[in-house]
Image (cartoon, rainbow, N blue to C red):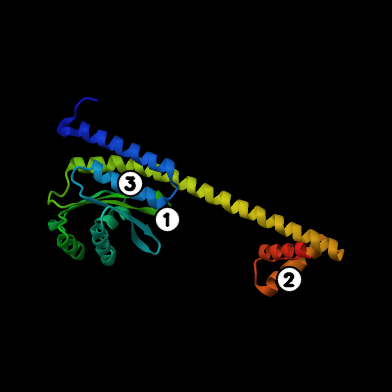
Amino acid sequence: MSELPGGSSAHLDEVRQALEALSDTVAVTDDPGALLQAVCEQVVRVVPGADMASITLVRAEGATTAATTHEVAVKIDSAQYDEGDGPCLRAARTGEIVRVEIDTARQLWPHFTTVAREHGVGSYLASPLAVAEGFSGAINLFGFGGHGFLELDQQILELYTLVVTTVLRLSHRATQAREQVRHLRIAMQSRAVIEQAKGILMAAHRITEDEAFQMLTTRSQHENVKLNIIAARFVEDSTRR
């Protein structure tokens, strides 16, 4: 690759290596928390002005920090959650990247900037993260310098976020698919034990399939216990006799 102005070629190479490391993480884990933590650790590596990173997730019940490279980042993000606004929440809501020099944002976000300054943070950069419905937020970068992050930092973060969003979407869909398979397996197992219980009742009482099912549902309602559990108990009791 030809050298780009400002050492961009080296920076893009760092992005490539970080994304390869992230891909390795995806290959060995299906834990969303571990994946988000890997995103945090790698983004600090690729963005020159970043000293810490965090990921904010916004849900119906509010915003939380789902991953971070340092506890200080959690405290600064929490100041935004308490205030109900701040660069990470602004990025998540608008879908636009937010770049802030802390000293210039005092009037806009007084609590956030005070807490940031108390911990030596002078710059903040947030990129929106939109993975799926109910799974959105921002990747947040913290700089101890007062540079406000450079244009190159923003461009690298935008590139990184674009690829990370695709990776997270694929991982999220795979997790949903596994969950659907799990529920289907449970449903099939439940149906099998109910059918077995019905068969035992039909043979023992010389009743129809509908009558056997009614006996099970009546007992389920009377004991306020799920039908498949009642059926499993009945089958187990029958095999002991």
Q: Residues within 10 Å of mark 2 (few under 14, many from 20)?
A: few
Of tags 2 and 3, which is closer to the observer? 3
For this view, does 16 lie left or right of residue 217?
A: left
Crowd tier of the residue under label 1, counting other residues whose Cα lies within 10 Å: few below 14, some 14–19, many 20 or above: few
Q: Earlier in the sequence, mark 2 or mark 3?
A: 3
- Which three-letter amino acid code belongs to the residue tagged 2? Thr
Residue found at the very far top of the displayed protein: 2
Q: Badge 3, how many Cα within 10 Å: few under 14, some, many 20+?
A: many
Instruction: Tell me which residue sits at (19%, 40%) in the image.
Output: 152
CA–CA distance between discs 2 and 1?
39 Å
Asked which secondary structure carries label 1, the reply is loop
Q: Position of residue 160 (x, y in %)?
A: 30, 41
Residues 5 and 195: in front is 195
Left or right: where 197 falls relative to 159: right
Q: Quick one: SS at disc 2?
A: helix
Q: Which mark is residue 185?
A: none
> Image point 77% across, 68% down: which residue?
215
Quadrant housing the C terminus: bottom right
Nearest-to-viewer mark from 1 and 3:
3
Q: Amino acid at mark 3?
A: Val
Looking at the rendered structure, which numbered label has been put on residue 218?
2
Residue at 66 percent of width and 53 percent of height: 188
Quadrant of image for the N terminus = top left
The residue at which mark 3 appears reads as: 39
Residue furthest right in the image: 206
Q: Which residue is mark 1?
A: 134
Picture quadrant of residue 21:
top left
- Residue 137: give x, y in percent of width and height: 34, 54
Three-letter residue code for mark 1: Gly
Q: Nearer the viewer, mark 2 or mark 1?
A: 2
| Residue at mark 2 to residue at mark 3: CA–CA distance | 52 Å
